[in-house]
Amino acid sequence: MNVTKIHQIIPRKLPGLLFVLLMIIALLGLVGCGGSGQTGSSGPLPAPSAPAVLQGYLGTQGAQYGSIGGVWQMSLNDTGHTYNIPLSSDLVQDGTGTTTLSNSVLQLAGVDAGNIGYAVEIPGRAVLYRPCGPNESTQTAPVIFVAQGACLNLNSTATFQFVQLPDMRWNPATDWAYGSVQTSTSGTQWSFSNLSLFTQSGNSVQAPAMLPAVCGASKNGNLISSLPDTANNIPATTIGVGPTGFFFADASLNSVPNGPGQSGTYLVSALPAKVGVIQPASALDTSAVMAAKYTGLLFEPCPSTSNGISCGEGGNANDLMTKLVAFVPGSSGALIGGGFPSSFSASGGIAFDLTQSPANNVGIMLGSQDSKNNGLYKTALATLPDPNSLCLSTTGAAGKDTGGNPTCTVPAVAVVGNPEGKYAIFLIAEDLLTSRPLGIYLYQQ
């Protein structure tokens, strides 16, 4: 909107007061012409700095085989095409190497003696990472990163919406699947209120409150962390908030005594990890969300077996715990996509062939946006391939794809955000065909 042009069309003999009123209306219109983002003076987040050439990230990992994941650190140099993953007590892999960009995916060469890791990056803002190593080629869980930087000082109370980063212990009937929390800051002090958790069907779930936390430097960068409240059995929590509102809360851990006759303790996850994004300031245009193209990760935690292996049994390089996926708008109004072809590399890790098209055997339909919570889709659906026609014995909806192949549609919940106009989707469901949790995490390309 151009104030100069408005001024030019006002008659020269217009009374002065009316002229002033029209100018005020024009200026108000200027404010209205902006977007409905959550950054800057109009939202709780301060205006973010431009992405750094060398950007640090902090993230949380999904549990694998009932392990506890951990806090990860990564730096990416998109100009110099290099990366670094420093080693710490939480990390099972470290490395420094080069990156190449292919099909909107960063390939991190040199991870764990020549194996390749894969990252989907919103430059300087957030990263979805699939680690890779010779001992975790098929069983590795994803890491959800947010950009690292100075401690944020929020302009006002912010609401973050999230889904659970599940492991095999997740019971969709009784355990929480999605939720939200309100956050405010005073200097480096962070306060949390109105933590709400719900099962996939929408039933409220009680959980320990998120304790006040402090943002400060640590070996993994500037983290927001709270001390445990042992008297009330509330564990410590580590939280990451990126400059544009990407959010994670690491799995909160409790120390549990070992069994009879054994000394010491071991750690178990008391509160699963949360991953998501700041709530949009206004309702999203769902049709625009569904019209975009996405790349990301599909995660199905693996159950433990007697030999510790369940994914990729028999050398099946396509039976992966975490797949690199892409989705595009489908003719039916759903997002259609699937995993890139994968195989074992010479060193025993997984290699995705990004020169080939991904599968188109998974569908996502967001459904209606919640009327009270922008960006929340409580009636989403995920359609999965069902080659053995198992859906008829589940609570899913059996059907067929355009090629006549059997499918199974299962209920899901999705949290969607649009930081800086880029859509991000975090979805949780149960794969009724495998009785495994299903997580899909997508960034718009």
Image (cartoon, helix red, strand yellow):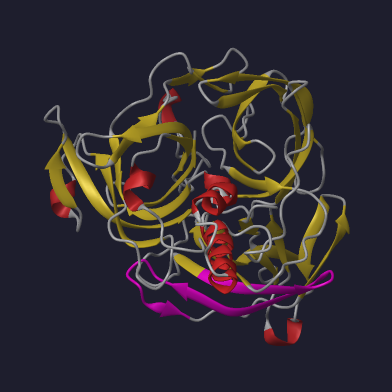
Examine the rendered structure and indicate whether residue 225 appears above or below residue 440: below
Examine the rendered structure and indicate whether residue 56 appears above or below residue 236: above
The residue located at (78%, 21%) in the rendering is: 80
Q: Is residue 85 left or right of residue 321?
A: right
Q: Quadrant of residue 429?
A: bottom left
Residue 147 position in % (x across, y down): 71, 46
Residue 263 visible somewhere in the drawing: no
Residue 251 visible somewhere in the drawing: yes
**Is 185 part of what is drawn in magenta?**
yes
Q: Chief secondary structure of the magenta span?
A: strand
Residue 67 position in % (x across, y down): 61, 52
The residue located at (45%, 62%) in the rendering is: 170
Q: Nearer the viewer, residue 25 or 93?
A: 25
Residue at the far bottom in the pictured view? 231
Examine the rendered structure and indicate whether residue 243 appears above or below residue 227: above
Q: Is residue 148 left or right of residue 337?
A: right
Q: Nearer the viewer, residue 141 or 353?
A: 353
Q: Nearer the viewer, residue 28 or 187?
A: 28
Residue 221 position in % (x across, y down): 83, 50
The residue located at (45%, 24%) in the rendering is: 315
**Is 213 part of what is drawn in magenta?**
no
Residue 141 position in % (x across, y down): 56, 42
Region rendered in magenta? 180-205
Examine the rendered structure and indicate whether residue 299 appears above or below residue 162: above
